[in-house]
Amino acid sequence: MTTTVTKEQIKEIAEQLDCGFSCYFNKKDNELLFVPDPDHHPDMEMSAWKSELKKIRKNPNNFITIDPPSSSESFEIMAEFAESLEDGKLRDELIQALNKRKPFREFKFVIDNSGDFRQKWFDFKSTKLQERVEDELRYVNDEEE
């Protein structure tokens, strides 16, 4: 069986992962289900996702689960972005931010005040998350063949 996912679905999955949702991709019919990840949304009431959870529990083997990136994976993406920039003030500020006590907050503060680079950061992160989704789905496809 070959799992086929469109570019639009990959983008949608990446966007939902970025919001802290887990994706459940149904290998049988390509349906996408999104459920809040408890690590990212510990206080969220799950009853709103009752029907999705029921579908997943009913046929768990039909679904490929893609979870949001871990803190260390998110940190790696931020570091990779900082390293990708040309030498200069912003690059130095981002690297310094990542070495502070609260690197996520510090990185966000610097990037939110970086003008056009803020959008470049969002585009970079989106691309990295889409690549991650493609890799995870490719790995599952390789196992099934």
Image (cartoon, rainbow, N blue to C red):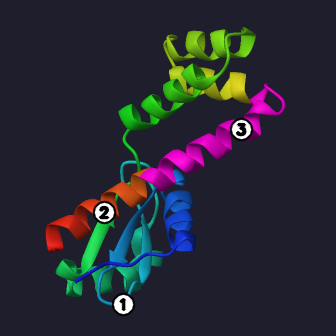
Q: Earlier in the sequence, mark 3 or mark 1?
A: 1
Residue type at mark 2: give it: Arg
- Label number found at residue 29: 1
- Tell me the CA gap for discs 3 and 2: 27 Å
Residue at 57% over, 29% down: 81
Of helix, strand and loop, which one carries label 1? loop
Residue 13: x and y in percent read 49, 65
Of helix, strand and loop, which one carries label 2? helix
**Circle 3 crowding by C-alpha within 10 Å: few under 14, some 14–19, many from 20:** some
In this view, 51 is above or below 83:
below
Q: Quadrant of residue 93?
A: top right
In this view, 119 is above or below 98:
below
Q: Earlier in the sequence, mark 3 or mark 2?
A: 3
Which one is in front, 25 or 102? 25
Residue at 15% over, 66% down: 143
Q: Earlier in the sequence, mark 1 or mark 2?
A: 1
**Which residue is denoted by mark 3 in the rendering?**
120
- Label number found at residue 78: none
Residue 101 visible in rendering: yes
Residue type at mark 3: give it: Lys
Residue at 67% over, 17% down: 86
- Tell me the CA gap for discs 3 and 1: 35 Å
Marks 3 and 1 close (CB-CB < 8 Å): no
The magenta segment is 112-131
Marks 1 and 2 close (CB-CB < 8 Å): no
Residue 42 visible in rendering: no
Residue 55: x and y in percent read 31, 86
**Which residue is denoted by mark 2 in the rendering?**
138
Between marks 1 and 2 in the image, the one whose residue lies nearer the viewer: 2
Residue 49: x and y in percent read 43, 77
